[in-house]
Structure formats: C-alpha cells, structure tokens
Image (cartoon, coloured by chain):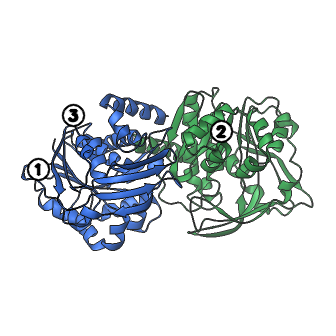
Chain colours: A green, B blue
Amino acid sequence: MSLLVTGSIGIDTVETPTGRRDNVVGGSAIYFAYAASFFTPVRLVGVVGDDAPKEFFDIFKGRDVDTSGLEIRRGSKTFRWHGSYLKDLNSAETVEVDLNVLAERAPKIPEKFRDSKYVFLANTHPALQQQMLEHLPSSQLIVADTMNLWIQTERHELSKLLKRIHGLVLNDGEARLLTERDNLIQAAREIIKMGPKFVAIKKGEHGSLMCTENELFVLPAYPAEQVVDPTGAGDSFAGGMMGYLATHDNFSPSTIKRAMAFGTVVASFTISDFSLAGLQKATRADIDARITHLREAMNF
Amino acid sequence: MSLLVTGSIGIDTVETPTGRRDNVVGGSAIYFAYAASFFTPVRLVGVVGDDAPKEFFDIFKGRDVDTSGLEIRRGSKTFRWHGSYLKDLNSAETVEVDLNVLAERAPKIPEKFRDSKYVFLANTHPALQQQMLEHLPSSQLIVADTMNLWIQTERHELSKLLKRIHGLVLNDGEARLLTERDNLIQAAREIIKMGPKFVAIKKGEHGSLMCTENELFVLPAYPAEQVVDPTGAGDSFAGGMMGYLATHDNFSPSTIKRAMAFGTVVASFTISDFSLAGLQKATRADIDARITHLREAMNF
C-alpha cells in the first residue's frame, strides 16, 4: 500500500569508536524509506541542495522507493550533520549542524502522492508537519516523530499536531520532556491524553515500549553484539514499523506490536555498519530470521 | 529445597522523590530471603550488632525463613547505609555508609545448614564468599553477586571465586567494569569465559539479560508505573530467581529464563514501596498474576 514519508535528507559525518565516515548519506527520511521498503512501496518527499553528491540518488536503485518527491533546489545547500558517539554509543553528540535547505520552505508533495493512505512525518517543525497533512487528504494512518527543540519552543503547534495524528514515535528523553514525567509508562499515558491513539517510545539499546488507551507493550532491543554506528536506528525502527503496518489493513494493538518487533529488527541491521551499509546488506529473509531469533531470545 | 543466602543485613535510611524513611530494615540478604521465600524455604546467614532494632527480627514472622544463622554480635554495630535517589531514580547515591560489623569476621554457617544444595552469596569480599563455600560441601548450584569495589581492588580473589560458582548476578555497570566491554552481550560472553555457566546482568528499569555458553535471553523489566524506592530490587530479583530455581531439579537455560522472569516480577513489588513494605503486601498469587501480565505485555 502507499506509504509516504517526508523528512530530512542529509550529508552526514559520523565518528564512532569503530571509525569515522565523512560526507555519507543520512537523514531521517532516507533511513525510514530504506527500512520501510523491505515491506512495501515507499514514496519519498524531501529536499536537498544542488551540492548533493550524485551517489545520493543511486541508493534506492532496485528498491521500490518512488523518489519523484525528491526536490533538488538550485542555489540551496543540503542539510549537513556531524555527530560523534565517541563519548556514548547510545547518544549522539552534535559536533556541527547546518540546516541549510531545511530552514527554507518545505518540499512540495507531488499530485500523484495525494492518495497516500499511510503517512510518516519524520521530525521537522510541527507547523510544517501540519502543512504536509493539508496535501494528504486520503491519509488513514498518520504517524509523526518530533524532537526536544520543538517540545521546548513550539509547544502550541506540537499540541495541534498531536490532535491530528494517530501515532507518535519519539525517544525516552523526548517523552520525558514532553510530559514532565520520569516514569516512561506514565509519560506514554500522558501522551495518549494529548491526542494520538498510540505512542511508541524508543529507548535505544534498551528497547522500546508502546502504549494505547488500554494496552501496554514492552520490547527489548534486538540483542546486537556489534554496534558500529547507531545513526538512523530510530528512523529505521519507524520505517520497519510503518512498512509492516502498511501491509495490513488494521491498526489493532496486536498488529502494532508485531510492527514494532519488525522495526526493532530492521534497526539492528542499521546499527551494524555506517550510514546505510548495514541495511543495504540485509534481505527480507534476514529480517524474518532475526524476528524468529528475537522471539526465541525473549521466550520464557 | 534448601536455599541458603548469606549477605548483608543493614539499617537503611533512604530518600526518594516520594519521601524519606529513616532506620528501616535493609541489606542484600534480607531482600533476597524475603523474595525467595515466596517459592521455597530459605536459610539466612548474616550478622548484626547489638543495636539492631527488635522489629528486625519480626520481619520473617510467618514466612519459611530459618534465621538460626543470624548472629547478633555483642559490642558490634549493625551495617548502616544512607542512600538517595533524588537525582536519579535508577541509581542510588550513597550519602553515608558504615560497614561496622561487616568489616569484622564473617558470620558462622550453622552445622545444620551444611547440607544446603542451593547457595546465594550476596555481595561481599570475594575471599569471604569463598570461605563460605568451604562450609557448604553439598552445594549444587552456587550463584554470587559482586560489586565495583571488589572488581577494582580484589580482581585476583574475584577470579578465583568465578571459577567456583555456577552463576553470577551483577548489574550493567559492574559487568562493563569487569570485562572492559561496553556492549553488554559481549560483556556477558566474556564473563562466561571466566568460569560461571551463566551470567545474569541486571539493568534496573531496562530489564535484564542472561547468557550461557550457547544461549542468550533478553527480558524487559516488569512495566511498573509507580516506583517508590528501588532499594533491594536487584537482591529481590536474585531472590525470586533463586527461589524459583530451588524448586526445580534442573538448571537448564529454559528453567533459568523462567526463574529470571519470576525475579523480575518479585522485584516489581519491592520497588512499589519503601524497604520491605512492597514485598510484604504481595502474595504468591499476585506474583503469578504479574507473570501472566508480563507475558502479555511482551507478546507479539
């Protein structure tokens, strides 16, 4: 089914205990789209500058990702992020960030994408996220991500957004900031009161939890022995989750739970190598094998 | 079956965001014994000073805990610990600690306890832990805990201990310190090479993991919405785990996994109130109900 993602596309420089990569492809929409495309066709909406390396446009070759919503804006520069995990492999320290084209107007959603049923609004200004929805009148499942910056500075717009989406995906620190609750289950319950039907809280190496009005789901992370580069893990989690959901016609708690398990497993491939290399080596069969292994590793 | 525990018995003062309790009963052996006694008879070996409040000796009233290994040493003072969770509910800050009687000679193991099959050596000096084993010739399953201090200062004695025990229970920070591995699965595999047949790593609110030579088990924490006082959670986890194991005649990975789930659930009662109050309110039926709930909350 038609899954649309809109979010950042960036040129990343990443340092981890394993090594360093300069000017590699990154950004929330890229990781999401690649991860979701293991399950379902993906429509990508995003914007880069005219400095984006030619290789960037080859990453989705052979995959069912429609990049006709990818705008190359003349005279603008691509979003750049330089992050370091040298101090803590669980949380990136931003060495440098240049919003560049992301600080300009949002990319246009192509007319032919207007019938998208499944929509993921990766992290950006909550007012922009709402504008996107104006152009997606057929959306039946809208899930969004957000970040500390908007929670702290754009609370009003974020509140409006939360009333219009079905699911929110965010990390533990963001959930605590949004709700001023230290206990994550309490935080999740507070978020449900703000609008979404479900909230998934990502805890990195500690797994994730999901809450609806009546259900609670706790999931450990896939037991990964080699973590090379955690960049994009959260976006891959969301991509795997939404990709799986888009192949189902119901959004019942049990479907969302299975979707989260797939998201967890897809993210385990992302962190196994730099940039997209871990995902590029994976197959759908590899994903299914890790789902089986995760079930076994949790079974008591 | 005969489960023996030896460890600390203390007078605790605890501050948490919920409140403060002065001079309440605490110590690793106390939490362990109470938790294990939901499953099996427990033999307690420990030492206090003659300042131990009379109430301390009533806490096991009505429970199958044999306290004849509890020594009240004249002229000595009971171990005291004052901890605060005001900054971080996941990790205690020690405000003050007085080893007192714990810095003296170890308590004696009563002759009638020498046939104990199941033994838990709660955290103390690894040389003392080994001395205890000399008096327990019938032990078939020996599990120990340890702490940062011994890892840093008594590596040689700890190494000798690790070769004599079947299982090690420790927290994530201790596992990283012991192995110099940041990744906990790698850390667990390193510990297996040091001697134990299995290692259980406790991650507080993030759950636990267990490793044998060939098996890996990951378990989220029980989803607790109210954490009042985390003191004793790790010892209760170990107590629930060993209590369950002592009712089984095999130590297969699948038995240890179920035992860890019981440990996780028992610890969820401990943290729901100060000192032993949470455990004192629980029944075996409550524990079984939470096991069912934990299974449901993990099911995908």
Residue B163 seen in render: no
The reply, left or right, for residue A192 in relation to residue A77 is: left
Please state the chain letter of the residue tagged with numbered disc 1 in the rendered image: B
| Residues at marks 1 and 2 on the same chain | no
Q: Which residue is mark 3?
A: B62
Say whether mark 1 and mark 3 are on the same chain.
Answer: yes
Q: Amino acid at mark 1?
A: Phe
Mark 2, other Cα within 10 Å: few <14 / some 14–19 / many ≥20: many
Tags 2 and 3 on a common chain: no
Pick the front one: B108 or A213: B108
Quarter that holds the N terminus of chain B: top left
In the image, taking residue B174 as reference, residue A215 lies left or right, namely: right
Q: Which residue is mark 1?
A: B113
Q: Name the subunit of mark 2.
A: A
Q: Nearer the viewer, mark 1 or mark 2?
A: 1
Q: In this rendering, which labeled residue sits more in front, label 2 or label 3?
A: 3
**Whether residue A168 is visible:** yes
Q: Position of residue B267 (x, y in %)?
A: 38, 43
- Which of discs 3 and 1 lies nearer the camera? The answer is 3
Residue that lies at the very extreme toward the right in this rendered image = A75
Q: Amino acid at mark 2?
A: Met
Please name the amino acid that badge 3 sits on. Gly
Asked which secondary structure carries label 2, the reply is helix
Residue under label 2: A242
Residue lying at 64% horizontally and 44% vertically, measured from the top left: A180
